[in-house]
Image: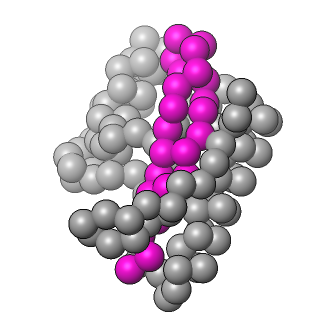
Amino acid sequence: MKRGWIEPRAGVGGFTFRARYWVVGPTGQPVARSKSFRVSDHPSRKAAEAAADRHLAEVLVDTARGTFVAPTEMTVGALVAAYLDGKSASVRASTMISQQGHARHIPPTSRPSGSIRSPP
């Protein structure tokens, strides 16, 4: 099976290069993913294609190493809340109160700037 490829695409919004690839989904089955790179966001058409190539290469290497983490729409606030929920039984009450106090300073709609990986 082909693991990944670049698709040149012309559309209403301009020309793009789409990196398409297969990754292992949460159920263990292959899932198709993609990321588009618009030519208008890069200095040239070749730069957009190179960006798509770099992204595809990174994803394929990470997938082969078993370190690929699919992007998520989860907010930082939701991630911290889930973390605190999981830790509440294993830390002292004073520690939990302190951590919850720090978590209140995170804006509810803040998005992660990159992939967030769960600790092992």
- In which quadrant of the rendered view does residue 77 lie? top left
Q: Which residue is at 52% across, 86% downward?
A: 44
Q: Nearer the viewer, residue 36 or 10?
A: 10
Q: Position of residue 64 (x, y in %)?
A: 78, 35
Q: Residue furthest left?
A: 108
Q: Which residue is at 48% across, 45% downward?
A: 34
Say above or below: 58 vs 62: below
Q: Position of residue 37 (x, y in %)?
A: 46, 65
Q: Would residue 40 appear left or right of 107 to someone viewing this image?
A: right
Q: Nearer the viewer, residue 65 or 18?
A: 18
Q: Residue furthest front?
A: 10
Q: Position of residue 33 (x, y in %)?
A: 49, 38
* Number of numbered discs visible in the structure rendering: 0
Q: Which residue is at 66% across, 26% downward?
A: 120
**The N terminus lies in which quarter of the figure?**
top right
Q: Report the span colored magenta.
A: 18-40
Q: Would residue 63 appear left or right of 13 to someone viewing this image?
A: right
Say above or below: 17 vs 27: below
Q: Main secondary structure of the magenta part?
A: strand
- In which quadrant of the rendered view does residue 13 lie? bottom left
On the question of residue 98 being in view, the answer is no
Q: Nearer the viewer, residue 35 or 110?
A: 35
On the question of residue 37 being in view, the answer is yes
